[in-house]
Image: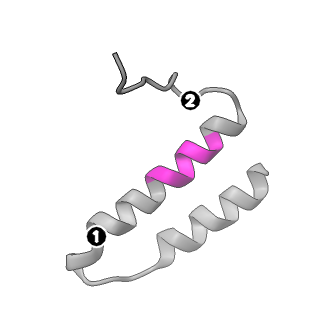
Amino acid sequence: YDAELDRIDDEVRKVRIPWAYAEELYQLRLHIRYVRDELHGRARPRTSDRP
């Protein structure tokens, strides 16, 4: 999966967008990192909103 995630991340880095969409692109890159961390068991433990 690492090679595929690297390929996706590389493609996303090449995307040129208007500044108005910069936050969405940033969020996409964060989600790619999150998936990578999940696959490697490095994701932060989830916290529940319930008491």
Which secondary structure lies at badge 1? helix
Which image quarter is the C terminus in?
Answer: top left
Horizontal relation, residue 39 to residue 34: left or right: right
Residue 43 place in picture, x, y as percent = 56, 29
Which residue position holds label 1? 22
Query: Looking at the picture, does residue 6 appear above or below residue 50?
Result: below
The amino acid type of the residue labelled 2 equals Ala
Report helix, strand or loop for mark 2.
loop
Callout 1 environment at 10 Å: few (<14), some (14 to 19), or many (20+)?
A: few
Q: How many numbered badges does the structure rendering display?
A: 2
Q: Position of residue 30 (x, y in %)?
A: 45, 51
The residue depicted at 54 percent of the width and 46 percent of the height is 33
Front in this rendered view, residue 16 or 23: 23
Q: Main SS of the magenta segment? A: helix
To which residue does mark 2 refer?
A: 43
Q: What's the distance in space between the residues labelled 1 and 2, CA to CA?
A: 24 Å
In the rendered image, residue 24 lying in the magenta stretch gets the answer no
Q: Tell me the colour scheme of the image.
A: one colour
Mark 1 vs 2, N-terminal side: 1
Percent x, y of residue 6: 67, 58
Looking at the image, which residue sits at the far front? Answer: 51
Above or below: residue 48 compared with residue 23: above
Instruction: Give the residues in magenta.
Output: 30-36
| Residue at image coords 42%, 24% | 48
10 Å crowding of disc 2: few (<14), some (14-19), many (20+):
few
Q: Nearer the viewer, mark 1 or mark 2?
A: 2
Q: Report whether 37 appears left or right of 48.
A: right
